[in-house]
Amino acid sequence: MIQQVMAEMRRGTSTVKQLSRKLKIEQSALGQILQFMLRKRMIRELHPECRPKGCLGCPYQGKCQDMPVIGYEVAVSRSGSEAGAE
C-alpha cells in the first residue's frame, strides 16, 4: 500500500481525501499509513505557506507545525533523489 500511496503522490494527488478516494481506502487507515511514512521521512506535510522547493530558506521553517496540514508530498533529499530511495 505504501508504494501505491507514493505512486499517487508522484502523480500529484496530495490530500487525504483524494488519496482515500483514488486508493479506495478509509481515511482513518490511510492516516495511519501517512503517519508511518512521515516518521520514516518518506513524505512531508504541506502547509498553506509551503514552497515548491521545500523548507530550505522558508521564513516559517521550524514554525510550520502550528499551521494546518493541507496535503502531503514525496520527500526529496538534498541530492534530489526521493527519500528512502538512497
Image (cartoon, grey):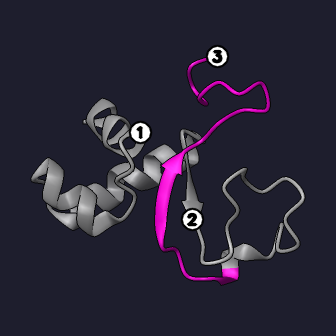
Tell me whether the residue at label 2 lies in contact with that at label 3, contact meaning CB atoms closer than 8 angstroms.
Answer: no
- Which mark is nearer the camera, 1 or 2? 1
Mark 2 vs mark 3: which is more N-terminal? 2
Q: Secondary structure at mark 3?
A: loop
Residue tagged 1? 10
Residue tagged 2? 46
Residue tagged 3? 86
At horizontal 52% and vertical 74% (from top left) the residue drawn is 69
Tell me if residue 60 is in the magenta stretch.
no
Neighbor class of circle 2 (other Cα within 10 Å; few <14, some 14-19, many 20+) is many
Q: Secondary structure at mark 1?
A: helix
Q: Which residues are magenta?
A: 66-86
Query: Which percent across, then down, holds residue 3?
Result: 32, 30
Magenta stretch prevailing secondary structure: loop
> Which is more toward the observer, 4 or 27?
4
Displayed quadrant of residue 59: bottom right
At horizontal 14% and vertical 62% (from top left) the residue drawn is 26
